[in-house]
Image: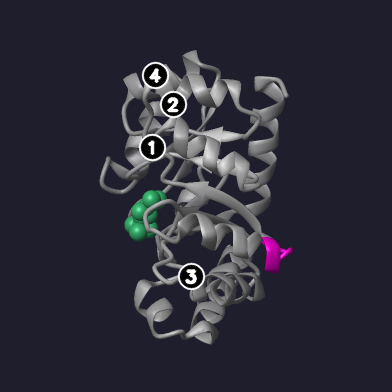
């Protein structure tokens, strides 16, 4: 796949998703019920982060048992992580940042990939490697919507998926920005609800977010 085709695919995926929950799965047995709870609430595109020992197995279980879910892998920090994500059948990859090695590996990989940026220089590196769709992380902490608008000036072709500090209260404001194609975060699957297996609550949170976005 060409770089342009991968970028187009990622843009379509993110735009269709709107919101992307960032999943940190501690126990393998939570993976499938958690994914079902999210999908049940109308949230189908999921970022399973490589932050726990069971992350790869958890992503595989979701792909095998929750076919409605569109599974991407997050917290990709190295070319090895990227290769693992591609091998397990992820639909996309996301990183909180970028390194020259990672950008090079992602350019050569078939996996649609969004590097993470928080500054103009990082965005320039991503763009120089052909990555126009980037994660803006940590979005609120790195200056919020004001920072994003400032970046939009010199980099009008960049498209963003902000994450970090986003929740029900501010996700609509982020998505109203013309260069924001999706917004992600952990508010859709709070760790406390996952820990207690409160799947109905997670579905309700997703439904609430989707309702308020539709109304906006
Ligand atoms: C991420 O990796 O995108 C963040 O950890 C999500 O941040 P949040 O927990 O503030 O939503």
- Disc on res. 100: 4
Provide the secondary structure element on which disc 3 rests. Answer: helix
Reading the image, the residue beneath label 1 is: 77
Dot in front, 1 or 3 = 3
> What's the coloring here?
one colour
Q: Which of marks 2 and 1 is nearer the N terminus?
A: 1
Dot in front, 2 or 3 = 3
Question: Which image quarter is the C terminus in?
Answer: bottom right
Reading the image, the residue beneath label 3 is: 28
Marks 4/1: CA distance? 11 Å
Q: Earlier in the sequence, mark 2 or mark 3?
A: 3
Marks 2/4: CA distance? 6 Å
Q: Indicate the quadrant of ligand 1 in the picture.
A: bottom left
Q: Where is residue 55 in the image (x, y as percent from the top left)?
A: 46, 58
- Left or right: 171 in relation to 37: left
Q: Position of residue 62 (x, y in %)?
A: 62, 64
Tag 3 and tag 4, C-beta contact below 8 Å? no
Provide the secondary structure element on which disc 2 rests. Answer: helix
């Amino acid at each position: 796949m060409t770089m342009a085709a991968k970028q187009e695919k990622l843009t379509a995926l993110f735009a269709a998703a709107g919101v992307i929950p960032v999943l940190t799965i501690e126990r393998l047995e939570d993976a499938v019920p958690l994914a079902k709870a999210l999908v049940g609430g109308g949230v189908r595109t999921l970022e399973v982060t490589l932050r726990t020992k069971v992350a790869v197995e958890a992503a595989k279980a979701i792909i095998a048992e929750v076919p409605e879910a569109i599974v991407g892998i997050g917290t990709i920090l190295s070319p090895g992580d990227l290769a693992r994500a591609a091998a397990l059948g992820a639909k996309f990859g996301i990183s909180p940042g970028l390194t020259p090695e990672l950008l090079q590996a992602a350019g050569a990989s078939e996996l649609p990939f969004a590097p993470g940026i928080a500054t103009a220089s990082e965005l320039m590196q991503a763009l120089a490697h052909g990555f126009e769709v980037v994660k803006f992380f940590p979005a609120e902490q790195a200056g919020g919507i004001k920072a994003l608008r400032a970046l939009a000036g010199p980099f009008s072709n960049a498209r963003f998926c902000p994450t970090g500090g986003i929740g029900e209260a501010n996700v609509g404001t982020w998505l109203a920005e013309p260069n924001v194609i999706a917004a992600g975060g952990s508010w859709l699957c709070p760790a406390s609800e996952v820990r207690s297996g409160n799947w109905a609550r997670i579905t309700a949170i997703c439904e609430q977010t989707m309702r308020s976005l539709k109304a906006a």
